Image: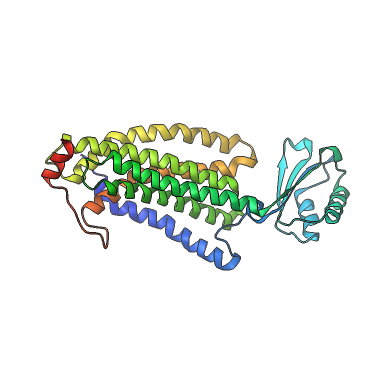
Amino acid sequence: MFSLIQKRRYFFLLSAFVIVPGLLLMIYSTITTGAPFRLSIDFVGGSIYELKFTTPDATESGLRDVFARFGDENVTVQALGAPEEYRWSVRASFRESTAETDSIIEALNSLAPIDRSRLRIERVSPTVGGEVATAAFLAVIVATVVVTGFIVIAFRQVPNAFRYGVCAILAMLHDVLVIASAVSLLGFLFGWEVDALFLTAILTTVGFSVQDTIVLFDRIRENIPLHLGEPYDAIVNRSILETIHRSLATQLNAFFIMAAILLFGGESIKQFIALLFIGLLTGTYSSIFTAVPLLVAWEKGEIPFINRFRPTSADLSEAGA
């Protein structure tokens, strides 16, 4: 039987190869900019301009030049709708006064006439982003406690049920770090910014990851009494091979849909879909190649500073009773 578990050290190294550079990049970004990521106006505050011009004379570079004259050289400019509609969205990181807003509108109008009836200006307070981030953090904490408690109760007949809960949480943390590493790298290379949808991608990934992990752990629990006398890692490997097709089949449907949105969807959601794609990919990976190998490594005493415990035949018999 092909053994995935025997190659667990390679899986751990692959995860470290992705996460460690991302952490270093986040530390560098924190030192140089004060934040681990490039933050959007959802977190730092600012203004959103939705503009409709009547001629094609307004260009992205022209819009950037106008805002640069008013002190913001890092605006996010995005075309909206069809090219012949001449619609643009501009996100500025400062919240200007009414007089400054009027001056900006006049400067933009000098590029091309603005349809004033379609003009929309929205102010964003940084406290909104802070409240969303706090709520998301609390949601992750609550999910951690609930998942650990559920696994401990549901797996109470399995020796050391608490380990299953801890490994599920570590896999979940692995997914969060992978997404954070990806965002930090993409922000450094392409100027991607973290907004409220980033938190949505994190929470969605956590849900998928925990679901897949629990399915795998449940199959291990079922196989322990059915294969008494087999080594623990052999039982775990058997459980992975029996459930891997289910995990892959479920996720592939979502991957195909997200790939289609990335190729043909609007620009405004492509960053979110890309992060969600990365999140579901790492969530599927971590359930199979992080959570379960960690469980085996813990049983074999390979995790530093943690006492080794190997289930005995009596333990396994009791679990199957």
The residue positioned 33% from the left and 36% from the top of the image is 215
The quarter of the picture where the C terminus appears is top left
Q: Position of residue 6 (x, y in %)?
A: 24, 49
Q: Quadrant of residue 188?
A: bottom right
Q: Is residue 101 left or right of residue 162?
A: right
Q: Is residue 128 left or right of residue 256?
A: right
- Residue 145, relative to residue 246: is it above or below? below
Question: Residue at position x 22%, y 40% from top?
Answer: 157
| Residue closest to the eye, 282 or 216 | 216
Picture coordinates of residue 114 (x, y %)?
85, 43
Q: What's the colour scheme?
A: rainbow
Instruction: Please state if 68 lies on the left or on the right of 3 as rendered.
Output: right
Tell me, yes or no, if residue 108 can be seen here: yes
Query: Horizontal and vertical percent for residue 84?
Result: 78, 36
Q: Residue 43: x, y in percent?
A: 63, 54
Question: Where is residue 68, by image quadrant?
Answer: bottom right
Count the marks: 0
Task: Tell me if I can see residue 2 in this picture.
Answer: no
Q: Is residue 298 left or right of residue 168?
A: left
Question: Vertical placement of 49 versus 39: above or below?
Answer: above
> Which of the image's four quarters has the N terminus?
top left
